[in-house]
Amino acid sequence: MFNFNPQTQKKLARFRKIKLGYYSFIVLSVMLALLAIAELLVNSRALVVQYEGTLYFPTYTDFHPGTDFGLDYAYETNYRDLAAQFDKTASSNWVIMPLVPYNAYENDATDSIMRPEAPNAARQHYLGTDTTSRDILARLVYGTRTALLFAFAFMVSVYLIGIMIGCAMGYFGGLFDLGFQRIIEIWSNIPFLYMVIIVFSVIPAEASIPARITLLLLVMVLFSWTSMTYYMRTETYKEKSRDYVAAARIIGASTQRIIFTHILPNVLSTLVTFMPFTIVSAIAAITALDFLGFGLPVPTPSLGELLKQGTANLRTAPWIVTAAFGTLVLILSLVTFIGEAIRESFDPKQFTLYR
Amino acid sequence: MSAPLLEVRDLKMHFPVKSGFFSRAKARNFAVDGVNLTINPGETLGLVGESGCGKSTLGRCISRLYEPTAGEILFKGANLAGMRHRQLLPYRQNIQMIFQDPMESLNARHTVGEILEEPFLIHGIGNAQTRRQAVSKLLDTVGLPGRSASRYPFEFSGGQRQRIGIARAIALKPELIICDEPVSALDVSIQSQILNLLMDLQKEFNLAYLFIAHDLAVVKHISDRVAIMYLGKIVEQASSDDMYHRPFHPYTQSLISAIPIPDPHHTATRILLKGDVPSPISPPSGCAFHTRCPKAQASCQHDAPILKTLAPEHIAACHFAAAP
Ligand SMILES: Nc1ncnc2c1ncn2[C@@H]1O[C@H](COP(=O)(O)OP(=O)(O)OP(=O)(O)O)[C@@H](O)[C@H]1O
Ligand code: SF4
Ligand SMILES: [Mg+2]
């Protein structure tokens, strides 16, 4: 498939030998694949509707008003009701619903009273509902997906900034390096949580949810990029003084070429070993912020928000905290196991390519 | 005689030394302190001296890895000192370098093919196909199999790696190659193979070498002329033969006495130097060698000797220079 260099192949073979990490990797990959197609598994929209001889696939398409299927309302079709109705009337029309026929936002309250309900397979609330009668499984699935996406975006942004600045500091040195060192010292002493609280208190109420999420990401990145610079700075400095860089300069390589084709590939290979741990800390951070109420804006599904509900209703609705806690532990353990395995199999001390 | 290929005039490289917490770089490391030398086309100049005397620094100034503090580096009359990347680029094709440790000097993440293609890429020579041909021709020239191109440096032995380094150095058809101890990291059995390769290439491409080594034995074989360096200065320079048979400087004499001679009847005694090489950060006054010189007199402590012609094409810097 990929044409890895023999050194990398050796590392991958070692990774495969570390069973806990390797199986965690497989499990997580399957989970990620399922999360990627979550709309087909956990959704209030039907997978397929056959109505009057035509097939509809509403999952990813625009919404169909009830009138499309002979109902008397113009808002989005309630496919569960539609299915029930088709069943009742024994018509030739039919609906195939996803495994879990709920989305993460709808309140499915019995008797119109919003309260947590215990898991109920007959109503297809496999993990029960939360305090506002939303399906917990649906909220877990979409909450996990959001958290992972958020953590990934966080990692990419932090690494990009950290790599650029750290690499420039290590490579150019001098006053540039000194200046940034001071800035970073000051910057990393600003308490992050206070900043989040302050920023959140000044966001205008009418800001859209994506805008709020982006802002949260921005604030988190802004106060986290510094940690990456330390590693990049020293590693770049070390690599820069190696003879292969001197050799490149002698054949006429430009600074740009030296940084991008020589130094970075050599430095970044170790970065792989940090990635899982960055993801873990990002998920933990966003969950904690959600728990405190300074995280993702409501009603975005999130693990932290579920944990908060769960701890508030520990006696009356223990299934909430169980589900949220279980998911969090599962995800964090999987990523940590993978991280440990990567760190062990990619150990730069064992695989150093230079002296 | 033809015009010299390279002429180095009064070259100085003083590294700032950080001495303490609030240091303002007061101290300086006089790594290269006023060196003059010339190299003619197709000629090998051996540069010999103990570890830390500034050989590599001198080589790296000439190849403009370092920006010298003072002095001129005239390559075919053009002064390379002070040139910036853009101006230097055309000269990069003419002056190349071979490093001591081939593993360190080859980017381990690139295949041999990529390493050897890079010079052509940078200087915009040829297209993908001609570059590939050029790479296999280079591999052939240095005696490596053609399939090496798709391999990585760590898949080769030390001697083979040095061949890769040599192939890269000759890729752009340079006229001068600075060889910074190219064989001292290699097994003795392989050293002569690499030296022979270097000499063959010299004949084939009319290369000039600045051949750096820390003992005279290696240099003897390959050099036309030899320069002896001590604490950032050249203390003696002569043709290779003359240097071995008639060393004037006490330092050179001790270096030559250290060369093992395979003749059991040979009885010359080794001149052992006392003490260590002084630090180039605070070189001794007068003749820098006086702290270790077996012939030192009181005047050596304050009068610095200058290079004097003591025989045709033979210069040395010693007040009491005498052939042994
Ligand atoms: N980049 C540098 N920055 C600061 N000091 C340096 C640098 N390179 C070399 N030096 C110092 O300059 C002096 C001469 O070093 P150099 O490497 O030129 O010696 P050398 O003769 O090549 O020794 P060796 O035989 O060990 O290679 C040493 O004191 C060394 O510490
Ligand atoms: S000048 Fe004096 S100290 Fe220097 S080499 Fe000659 S004899 Fe020795
Ligand atoms: Mg050296």
Image (cartoon, rainbow, N blue to C red):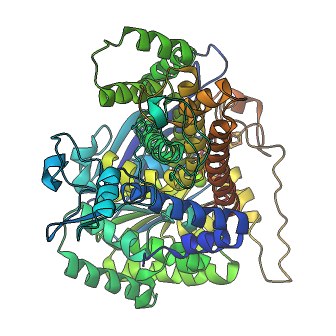
Whether residue A266 is visible here, answered yes or no, is yes
Q: Residue at x 35, y 25 (%)?
A: A212
Q: Nearer the viewer, residue B139 or A280?
A: A280
Whether residue A257 is visible here, answered yes or no, is no
The C terminus of chain B: image quadrant = bottom right
Q: Residue at x 86, y 82 (%)?
A: B265
Q: Position of residue B287 (x, y in %)?
A: 66, 35
Q: Position of residue A202 (x, y in %)?
A: 37, 8
Q: Position of residue B16 (x, y in %)?
A: 54, 27
Identify the image quadrant of residue A313.
Answer: top right
Is the residue B293 above or below the residue A250 in the image?
Answer: above
Q: Is residue A102 left or right of residue A286?
A: left
Q: Residue at x 68, y 50 (%)?
A: A333
Q: Residue at x 38, y 52 (%)?
A: A43
Q: Position of residue A149 (x, y in %)?
A: 43, 44
Is the residue B191 above or below the residue B279 in the image?
Answer: below
Considering every residue shown, the one lying at the far front of the view is A89
Q: Nearer the viewer, residue A10 or B41?
A: A10
Is the residue B9 above or below the residue B197 in the image?
Answer: above
Identify the image quadrant of residue A112.
Answer: top left
Identify the image quadrant of residue A69.
Answer: bottom left
Labels in figure, total: 0
Q: Nearer the viewer, residue B115 or A206?
A: A206
The N terminus of chain B: image quadrant = bottom left
Q: Is residue B281 left or right of residue B175?
A: right
